Amino acid sequence: MKSTNNNIPFKATLPGEVLKDELDARGINQKDFAIEIGIQKTMLNEIIKGKRPITADLAVLLEKSLGISAEYWMRFQTQYEIDVARIKEKNIQRIANIEWWGIIKELIPVSYFKKMSYFVDDLSENISITKKIYNIKSIDELVTLNAERKFSLFRKSDKLQIDERNVLAWNVVAKYEAQKQVVDTFKLENIPNLIQELNTIFYKNNDVLNLVTTALNKYGIKFVLVPKLDKTPIDGYTFWSGNNPTIALTLRHNRIDNLAFTLMHEIGHIQLHLQKDKEQQFFDLNTKDSHLDVLEQEADSYAQVNLIPTHLWNSFKVDKRDIDNSVLEFSNKNKLNPAIVLGRVSFELKKYNIQTSISKTLN
């Protein structure tokens, strides 16, 4: 009989049903019982079927006749009415959830969130999770957020096929995961030491992701790897989360040169731009467009210089007849990953389809 908000019965139990069971158990005829307590048989029938409530006067009559306290019958009647109200409220909420979920399915990549194990087999819980990930309080805010689709800075190319719904999902997942992380204090003056450690990691190319994560966290930078989505050609995203700068990447290509350049590019944003204005966000869509924003150009130049110092690069004379050997010789001499050097050669020569035996695989 008793229920709580967390344990709402599927069906409310009528006090009249309990009265009928009691009469049947005692072998009392309903007509005789109606006469005994002084009410019409039709009235008793309506009470049993729930068409009439058990009133205080009737509860006293039932107590005198059956020996079951009037308080019991009144509590039962009250609980029944509460249960009916809660069931109605639950059904209203269930209908609202179905309507909301219909909107949500149009605005977020549901299958992606399932793959990420964010969603469970409960509609109400999934709606709550959606609000948490998107940092919203209502579904209306989700509609507004999708309508705006505004990011502070990003590379744009008309040649790219972009699903803005997926881009927004990638963005909010990066922020959501970053909020969970706790890392050491960030100090701008420690970045040169970080860069030195990263270049050693890139050169050795062994257990790179784990070592990069450890290094970034040690120097106070949060690091998030966000699984890729269709039509979401994202390289990286740099923003401030809590007390720390954050870098989020997608490994669309399992390549050491791609990871190294993108990561160093984002560190460039942190040192050159983000630390001056923590409200900025740098959201980079992958493109080879030459007309980049000035800040993006600065971050690109920063990545080039910090992956291969200028004085070393100026000393490198690439043999166009035997690019691989000249790259390997230069890389081994200066403890640089050859795939990164080859990437710089490709950029300088504007040749991105150089035939090579040099491995670019991220290990």
Image (cartoon, rainbow, N blue to C red):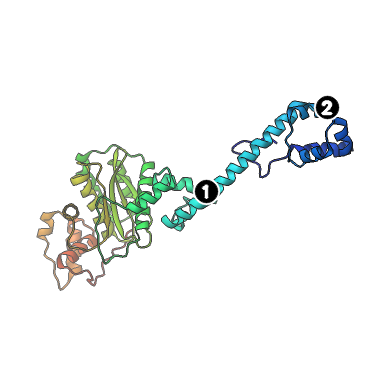
Please name whichever residue, 300 or 349, is drawn nearer the observer in this view of the structure.
300
Q: Is residue 43 or residue 178 the one in the foreground?
A: 43
Residue 312 visible in the picture: yes
Residue 19 in the image: above or below residue 154: above
For residue 300, side relative to residue 85 (left or right): left
Q: Is 30 left or right of 85, judged from the image as shown? A: right
As helix, strand or loop, the secondary structure at mark 2 comes to loop
Image quadrant of residue 135? top left
Please name whichever residue, 358 or 57, is drawn nearer the observer in this view of the structure.
Answer: 57
**Residue at disc 1, secondary structure:** helix
Earlier along the polypeptide chain: callout 2 or callout 1? Answer: 2
- Across and down, in percent, residue 91 comes to 59, 46
**Amino acid marked by disc 2:** Gly
Q: In which quarter of the image is the C terminus?
A: bottom left
Q: Nearer the viewer, residue 69 or 316?
A: 69
Residue 88 at x, y = what percent? 61, 43
At 34% from the left and 51% from the top, the residue drawn is 171
Check the image and report above or below for 40 versus 282: above
Residue 327, image quadrant: bottom left
Coordinates of residue 101 in the picture (x, y in percent): 49, 52
Mark 1 lies on residue:
96
Three-letter code, disc 1: Ala
Mark drawn on residue 67: 2
Question: Quadrant of the rendered structure where residue 67 is?
Answer: top right
At 18% from the left and 46% from the top, the residue drawn is: 272
Relative to 318, say whether 247 is above or below: above
Circle 1 packing at 10 Å, graded few (<14), some (14-19), many (20+), is few
Q: Residue 249's x, y, as percent? A: 32, 53
Q: Residue at x 84, y 38 (%)?
A: 41
